[in-house]
Image (cartoon, helix red, strand yellow):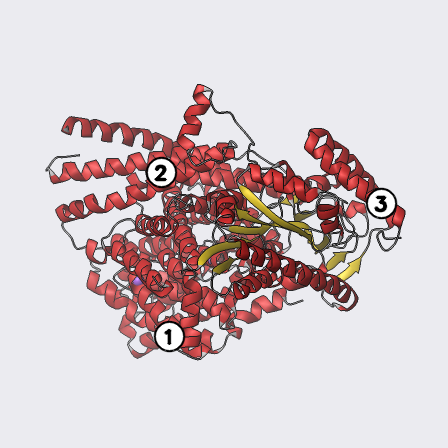
């Protein structure tokens, strides 16, 4: 019996992919004992990230790890993936939203319509800013050219941010060539891991969302053809990867903020940051008005945020 | 079929297709799409070729390519370098072999204004070469001087070759450019030393300019020096805003192109014909590059998608068990060999999927390797049977210079370049000191 | 047949010549966009659209200029052997090898068409029937693909330009093929 082979492309470059995707693939390959062999490719390696979704539908790529936003998902879910402004506080919020508050069903259903099987979502790090210039007030955001997620970029542009869209692996170079002033893309763990901490100087502790929402996807036909026991192995590998990432980020964010020596921490005072939080509420309302499905998802975020704000710390920041 | 076998098949069929003399992008593209169809079939096999076009569009540093090409053509077509040449002529003419040394100086300045070797070749062959021959300089030596000197265009910043390398190796263009400065100047100095030694041993190779030819009022002599200001001004207008972070690399290249264009207009050299030639040649060279890169990206994606890169990596490091330096030297030797047959873009196609990840995996600095790569490209430019400078020289040289002369002229300069390559390999700081100093904090 | 070939060559070369001559000035469009970008960035606020617009302009420049660059004969060849051959032998070999080029361009063209269909919201694998369906009304436009930037331009226009460019490139290569056929027949071109 010959092995089933998958080509798997992740949103992450090689340095980050080592932590966010590779453990999943290694687990599956080992557990599948030669029955399924997945080959992992990093950002833009086989197809550019912008073409990733079409490639997944066609089967050029068999499976993908990415957020809906950066892979330009053609579903209405696109703007909710990645960092939906101020939607979450901690990475555990994401599995709760998906598994307890029903987002998983919506995701599964919407992707089935476009020929793709959605497998699982997880939370990762918050979305902070790392920049060459110091940011201590909202006014400092004005005119900053930042590498960020499409939806986050649209939201931030009201504060004068100029979002720049380039391939992930080019972002570090782009800071040096002056195409970028920094990133609004990740927490501090990633800044250090991928080398962005080497080219920027400051880290803003305010985040525009507490956890990245990213998913694992697979081509519909390819998934249908996979024997049940291998499906179970794939799902187990993904879950194991979620656990690893939760710890890696949670520990990394604390350690590098406290002990990292490449990025200096800065904050915009909470009195001023409220402006951003209020803008997010307006943004939510706008997005909700676009369609019934959007309204349903935004309502889910509202319901959950109501619950955690009543629950208080550690669910909220105090 | 094993990965090694597929990789070998892809490469050998590409080389075979190249030998038929067809357009390079056709050969690479054909192998790429056939391989993707065979391996992916209707599961997206048709899409990979076009996906490369989208990838190419998103690679923003490629925008500098047409800008630098345009800049080079404006400089050479408008002949605004004439005064520059006169300056070196008068100031260096009194030395043994002085005009040849001055020509190297001219080439360094031209290199600082454009990203390819074409402009240097055109200026060298049309302005400098006839004058040198008229003054009784040895034809073989000066033919070599111009070919070697103009190849500095890709090592001294700005450099198109380093932009392409940066894209493939994902290394910072700014650092690569800075890394090229010292090796570029060092190589120019090595050329000059070579010329001086030869002319000292055999003064007939580079006779001293007669006194009456150098006889010129001091004021006029000093005025000629201002010709040197033009390239410095163009270089400054382009690089100062970039280094200060006012403009990005891509924006700066447009400023440089505009500056060269305006300089030609102000000097009254932008005739209809010059304009037509610059604009048309820019299109034709840019198209050539872009279509090759387009095909090469598809080739690379398929090659990568096969897992061939991983296979070759493990072949070298695990199966053969060679030490990193042995692998690097072997690679550089094969690379020089390939360079004699191929042009730089085609070499990049081969280097990209094979060498760059391997060099990285071996733990070498990829900025440093970029300089080794570029020096190898310089050698490739001059060595028969395939080299741009060789072709250009053949097309532009005056009739008394035969093909034999051209082929023989390059020998000593290629040896000097190999020497420079070895120096940069042994002393990586030659390349890395400046970028570390500038970007170091 | 020979008359048809002559006419084909004349028409295609003339069309591509004109398209290429227009595309040629695209260098100033790219330069202009980047200069606007520099000025805005240095003196005012950076602009959202310039980098992406310059990229679109560059794609149009090299894709539409491609056929003209073939006419100008600027595409490099490895002339290790080729350079030594007689004109007749070159024509014979070119006659064969141009089919490889044509094949590559056909695959590229198919990819461009299917990617453009995707940018109109078609998820299937029959882009041609989708486009004919659009005309007859049996298919409709779905989710329009946009660039993932804050500027969010639609992507179909640039993909459409690429279809045109690749198609013209294909026509030009067929013209080169016919020229070789005529050359081998001993005709003047
Ligand atoms: Na240069
Ligand atoms: Na060569």
Beta carbon of the mark 1 residue lies under 8 A of ligand 2: no
Q: Secondary structure at mark 3?
A: helix
> Which image quadrant for residue A153?
top right
Tag 2, which secondary structure? helix
* Mark in front: 3 vs 1: 3
Residue name at image x 80 percent, y 46 percent: A138
Q: Which residue is the site of mark 1?
A: B330
Are discs 3 and 1 located on one and the same chain?
Answer: no
State the separation of the CA atoms marked 3 and 1.
65 Å
Specify few, some or many for label 1: CA neighbours under 10 Å numbering under 14, 14-19, or 20 or more. Answer: few
The N terminus of chain A appears in which quarter of the rendering?
bottom left
Residue on which disc 2 sits? B273
Tell me if mark 2 has few (under 14), some (14-19) or many (20+) residues whose alpha carbon lies within 10 angstroms of its own.
few
Q: Do discs 2 and 3 share a chain?
A: no
Contact between marks 2 and 3 (CB within 8 A): the answer is no
Indicate the chain on which mark 1 is placed.
B
Quarter residue A188 falls in: bottom right
1 or 2: mark nearer the eye? 1
Name the residue that disc number 3 marks.
Answer: A307
Residue drawn at x 42%, y 45% as measured from the top left: B44
Judge from the rendering whether residue C12 lies leftward or rightward of residue A19; answer left or right. left
Q: Is residue A285 above or below residue B414?
A: above
Quarter of the displayed picture in which ligand 2 can be seen: bottom left
| Chain for disc number 3 | A
Could you say where residue A98 lies in the image, as x and y percent from the top left? 71, 46
Q: Separation of disc 2 and disc 3 at Cα?
A: 75 Å
- Residue B25 appears at what percent x and percent y? 33, 49
Helix or strand or loop: what does disc 1 sit on? Answer: helix
């Amino acid at each position: 019996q010959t092995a089933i082979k998958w080509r798997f492309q992740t949103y992450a470059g090689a340095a980050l992919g080592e932590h966010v995707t590779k453990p999943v693939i290694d687990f599956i390959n080992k557990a599948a004992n030669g029955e399924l062999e997945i080959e992992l490719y990093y950002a833009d390696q086989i197809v550019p990230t912008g073409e990733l979704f079409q490639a997944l539908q066609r089967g050029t790529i068999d499976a993908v790890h990415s957020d809906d936003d950066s892979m330009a998902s053609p579903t209405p879910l696109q703007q909710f993936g990645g960092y939906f402004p101020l939607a979450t506080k901690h990475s555990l919020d994401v599995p709760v939203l998906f598994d307890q508050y029903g987002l998983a069903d919506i995701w599964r259903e919407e992707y089935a319509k476009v020929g793709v099987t959605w497998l699982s979502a997880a939370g990762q790090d918050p979305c902070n800013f790392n920049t060459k210039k110091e940011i201590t007030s909202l006014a400092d955001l004005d005119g900053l050219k930042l590498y960020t997620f499409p939806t986050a970029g649209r939201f931030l542009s009201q504060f004068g941010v100029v979002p720049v869209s380039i391939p992930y692996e080019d972002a570090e170079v782009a800071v040096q060539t002056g195409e970028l002033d920094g990133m609004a893309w990740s927490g501090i763990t990633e800044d250090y891991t991928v080398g962005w901490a080497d080219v920027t100087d400051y880290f803003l502790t305010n985040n525009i969302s507490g956890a990245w929402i990213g998913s694992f996807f697979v081509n519909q036909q390819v998934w249908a053809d996979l024997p049940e026991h291998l499906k179970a192995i794939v799902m187990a590998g993904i879950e194991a990867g979620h656990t690893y990432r939760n710890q890696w980020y949670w520990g990394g964010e604390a350690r590098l903020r406290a002990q990292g020596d490449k990025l200096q921490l800065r904050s915009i005072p909470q009195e001023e940051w409220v402006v951003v939080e209020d803008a997010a509420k307006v943004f939510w309302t706008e997005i909700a008005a676009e369609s019934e499905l959007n309204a349903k998802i935004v309502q889910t975020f509202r319901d959950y945020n109501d619950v955690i704000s009543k629950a208080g710390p550690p669910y909220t920041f105090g | 079929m094993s990965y090694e076998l597929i990789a070998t098949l892809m490469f050998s069929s590409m080389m075979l297709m190249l030998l038929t003399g067809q357009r390079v992008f056709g050969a690479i593209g054909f192998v790429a799409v056939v391989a993707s169809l065979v391996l992916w079939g209707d599961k997206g096999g048709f899409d990979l070729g076009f996906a490369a076009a989208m990838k190419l569009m998103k690679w923003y540093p490629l925008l500098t390519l047409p800008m630098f090409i345009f800049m080079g053509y404006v400089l050479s077509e408008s002949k605004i370098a004439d005064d520059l040449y006169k300056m070196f002529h008068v100031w260096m003419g009194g030395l043994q072999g002085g005009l040849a040394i001055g020509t190297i100086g001219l080439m360094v300045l031209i290199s600082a204004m454009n990203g390819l070797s074409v402009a240097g070749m055109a200026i060298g062959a049309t302005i400098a070469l006839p004058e040198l021959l008229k003054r009784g300089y040895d034809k073989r030596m000066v033919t070599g001087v111009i070919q070697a000197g103009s190849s500095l265009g890709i090592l001294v910043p700005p450099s198109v070759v380093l932009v392409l390398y940066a894209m493939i190796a994902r290394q910072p263009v700014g650092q690569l450019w800075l890394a090229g400065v010292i090796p570029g100047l060092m190589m120019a100095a090595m050329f000059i030393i070579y010329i001086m030694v030869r002319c000292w041993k055999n003064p007939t190779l580079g006779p001293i300019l007669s006194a009456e030819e150098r006889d010129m009022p001091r004021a006029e002599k000093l005025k000629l020096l201002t010709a040197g200001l033009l390239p410095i001004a163009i270089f400054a207008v382009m690089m100062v805003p970039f280094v200060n972070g006012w403009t990005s690399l891509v924006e700066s290249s447009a400023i440089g192109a505009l500056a060269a264009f305006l300089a030609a207009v102000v000097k009254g050299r932008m005739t209809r014909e010059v304009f037509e030639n610059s604009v048309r040649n820019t299109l034709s060279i840019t198209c050539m590059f872009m279509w090759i890169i387009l095909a090469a990206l598809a080739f690379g994606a398929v090659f990568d998608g096969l897992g061939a890169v991983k296979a070759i990596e493990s072949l070298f490091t695990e199966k053969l068990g060679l030490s990193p330096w042995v692998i690097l030297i072997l690679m550089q030797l094969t690379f020089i060999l390939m360079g004699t047959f191929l042009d730089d873009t085609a070499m990049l196609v081969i280097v990209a999927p094979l060498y760059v990840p391997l060099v990285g995996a071996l733990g070498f600095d990829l900025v440093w390797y970029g300089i080794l790569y570029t020096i190898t490209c310089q050698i490739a430019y001059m060595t028969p049977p395939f080299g741009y400078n060789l072709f250009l020289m053949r097309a532009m040289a005056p009739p008394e210079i035969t093909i034999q002369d051209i082929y023989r002229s390059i020998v000593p300069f290629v040896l000097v370049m190999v020497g420079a390559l070895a120096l940069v390999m042994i002393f990586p700081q030659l390349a890395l000191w400046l970028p570390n100093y500038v970007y170091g904090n | 047949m020979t008359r048809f070939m002559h006419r084909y060559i004349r028409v295609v070369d003339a069309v591509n010549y004109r398209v290429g001559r227009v595309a040629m000035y695209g260098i100033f469009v790219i330069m202009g966009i980047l200069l606007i970008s520099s000025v805005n960035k240095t003196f005012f606020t950076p602009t959202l659209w310039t980098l992406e617009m310059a990229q679109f302009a560059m794609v149009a420049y090299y894709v539409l200029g491609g056929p003209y660059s073939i006419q100008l004969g600027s595409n490099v060849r490895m002339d290790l052997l080729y350079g030594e051959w007689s004109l007749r032998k070159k024509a014979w070999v070119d006659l064969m090898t141009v089919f490889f080029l044509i094949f590559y361009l056909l695959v590229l063209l198919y990819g461009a068409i299917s990617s453009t269909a995707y940018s109109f919201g078609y998820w299937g694998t029959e882009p041609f029937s989708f486009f004919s369906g659009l005309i007859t009304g049996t298919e409709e436009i779905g989710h329009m693909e946009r660039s993932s930037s804050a500027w969010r331009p639609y992507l179909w226009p640039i993909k459409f330009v690429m279809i045109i460019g690749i198609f013209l490139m294909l026509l030009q290569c067929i013209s080169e093929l016919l020229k070789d056929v005529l050359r081998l027949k001993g005709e003047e071109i």
